[in-house]
Image (spheres, rainbow, N blue to C red):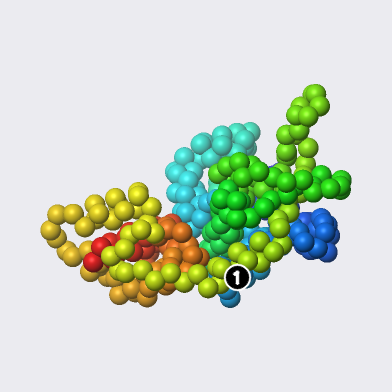
Amino acid sequence: MQRRRKNLEKPVFENPREPFIDRLLVADPSQWPKADSTKCFILKAVNIVGSAMFGSDWRGNELSVLNWPIEPNVAYDSYQKNLTRYREDRAEFAKFHGLTSMTSNEINAHVQSYYEHISRLVELKWLQGEQIAWETNQAATVRLEGVASCLAQKCRDGDISGFYRMKDGGRLNPMVPEDWNVEDIVSKFLAHGGYQRWFNDSPPAQQLPVFIFFDKSEIEATAAMLQHNVISKSATDLSHVSPLSKSDAISISKKTPGRKKGDGSMAAADKPLLAEMRELIDSGKAFSPNGAAKLVGHKAVGGGCFDSKADRLAKRYRASELK
């Protein structure tokens, strides 16, 4: 009985989180796959290009980001609502946790232990720490995805040459631009420093693990270009905004008369963040208002979850571009 109760006291609103990239691979660069000195392993290339794109904002923790899908504050609020419902309906609580064989008093004790556990975590500011860690992880994930997207596009355009090597060693073979025509670059190519490549030369066709390398001189040239790629744009130029973003911004400008857009209580506090978003987009560190908003969202004031703050900043940025 005691063992079951101990399990229930575990914070069930704590989200499962998994590393995007193999931790053993990230932990010791000296163990990274080897090739001749003219080539660069993909994870090393990510760090080189990331440092060029983001400067001091590239923290070095990007390769260790976690797949952490649910914001702690949102998960906690949902858990509290469920717990309130359970207090009102103990039978539902017992059924959900497989405790139907317990007496009413035992079930009441379990529900009470949940509340006590929540109170302890709040007092210890556990949730606050979780939220900060989640927002830090989100920002690092956005930076990693930005670098991965940049590298993939360069490979599609033929600006960077990719190579694959069998996991057990051997020669490097050229990849073709079409190999990079996938959407989830991080999971496909970064998770294990390579991917599962189809080999159809001799039947039966099979997938085998390979590592990815780039031409080192092309990676260095890309990094040098990104470091000096500060683009000057006029305030009315929407060429760097996606078509969907343009239509959103235009629709905002056509709203019916009322309080002037941007005159809300958060407008003054958001203004410096909009300027920071502008710099991120102009320097190529972010590719859209949504991406830039996620990079600065943790600095936004006001209520609401991280995503709602990022959405607010992105919408306000698009509207400001039309002024």
- Above or below — where is 252 with respect to 100? below
Per the image, label 1 sits on a secondary structure element best described as helix
Identity of the residue furthest to the left in this view: 257
Query: Farthest top residue?
Result: 203
Reply above or below: 72 against 168. below
Q: Classify the position of the N terminus by image quarter.
A: top right
Q: Position of residue 227 (x, y in %)?
A: 56, 72
Residue 286 point in image, percent of width and height: 48, 62
Where's residue 8, x and y in %? 63, 48
Along the line of sight, which residue is nearer the eye, 247 or 270?
247
Q: Is residue 126 visible?
A: no
Of residues 43 and 257, the one nearer the viewer is: 43
Asked if one can make out residue 201 in the rendered structure from this viewpoint, the answer is yes
Depth order, front residue of 77/163: 163
* 199 sits to left or right of 58: right
User: Closest to the observer: 9 or 305?
Assistant: 305
* Residue at x-position 47% and y-position 40%: 89
Task: Using a 10 Å C-alpha cutoff, classify the residue at mark 1 as few (fewer than 14 neighbours), some (14 to 19) or many (20 or more).
Answer: some
Q: Amino acid at mark 1?
A: Ala
Which quarter of the rendering shows the C terminus?
bottom left
Residue at 50 percent across and 70 percent down: it is: 229
Splitting the image into 4 quarters, where does residue 130 fall?
A: bottom right
Q: Is residue 259 left or right of residue 81?
A: left
Which residue does the image show at 82% across and 56% down from the upper left? 35
Identify residue for label 1. Answer: 224
